[in-house]
Image: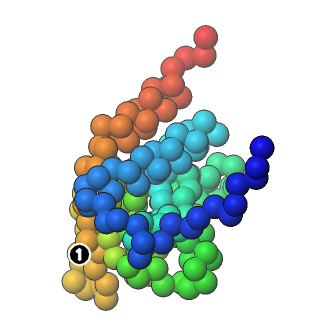
Amino acid sequence: MAIAGPIATPSILHEPLTAPLDADRRWMDEAIREAAAAGARGEVPIGAVVVVGNRVLAGAGNASVAEHDPTAHAEVRALREAAHAIGNHRLSKTTLYVTVEPCVMCMGAALHARVARLVYGCPDPKGGAAGSLFDLASDRRLNHRIAVTAGVAEDACRALLQEFFRRRRAPPT
Ligand code: ZN
């Protein structure tokens, strides 16, 4: 069997534009895959991907337990990997997709990175910093604002979390 040639790299210039909602759902599905993989590793199942145009720069799930690192949230890991990938600590024009509303730390990281847009799945009323508990995305005292779209694949994102915590609370059989 012939070996296939080099895999074509998708280019934002050559790919047809996808309707924003379809694209959001498509990228959120990637974030959900990262979340599920994190859950399977015993981490809180939250996943994130960083996208520019029609291209994924990075994807990651939570890894705080495995890495003994309180900062190893999915968003921080994905932002770090994306910045490495493009060789720039500024991630202007990127969209951060995350299954759950980011915490204060992750919103801080997204602001430092100058992320243009945040799309998240389910809100976190107890710790969310993109509109629930705090609204760091549109706080005019800060020098950058992030456009937020909430509720993309909300039920699927929440179900992952609920199932994880239900299992953790369940008595051993
Ligand atoms: Zn976080």
**Which amino acid, mark 1?**
Ser
Answer above or below: position of 100 versus 16.
above
Answer above or below: position of 74 versus 89.
above
Indicate left or right for 163 with 7 as reference.
left
Which residue does the numbered mark 1 point to in the structure image?
138
Neighbour tally class for label 1: few under 14, some 14-19, many 20 plus, Cα within 10 Å? some
Answer above or below: position of 133 versus 35.
below
The quarter of the rendered structure image containing the C terminus is top right
The quarter of the rendered structure image containing the N terminus is top right
Residue occupying the point 34% across, 65% down: 16
List x then y, in percent, for residue 45: 50, 43
Q: Is residue 89 visible?
A: yes
Residue occupying the point 58% across, 80% down: 86
Answer above or below: position of 36 versus 112.
above
Circle 1 SS class: loop
List x then y, in percent, for residue 126: 32, 50
Q: Quadrant of residue 38?
A: top right
Q: Nearer the viewer, residue 12 or 138?
A: 12
Residue occupying the point 42% across, 72% down: 14
List x then y, in percent, for residue 29: 42, 46
Indicate left or right for 48 with 137 as reference.
right
List x then y, in percent, for residue 134: 27, 65
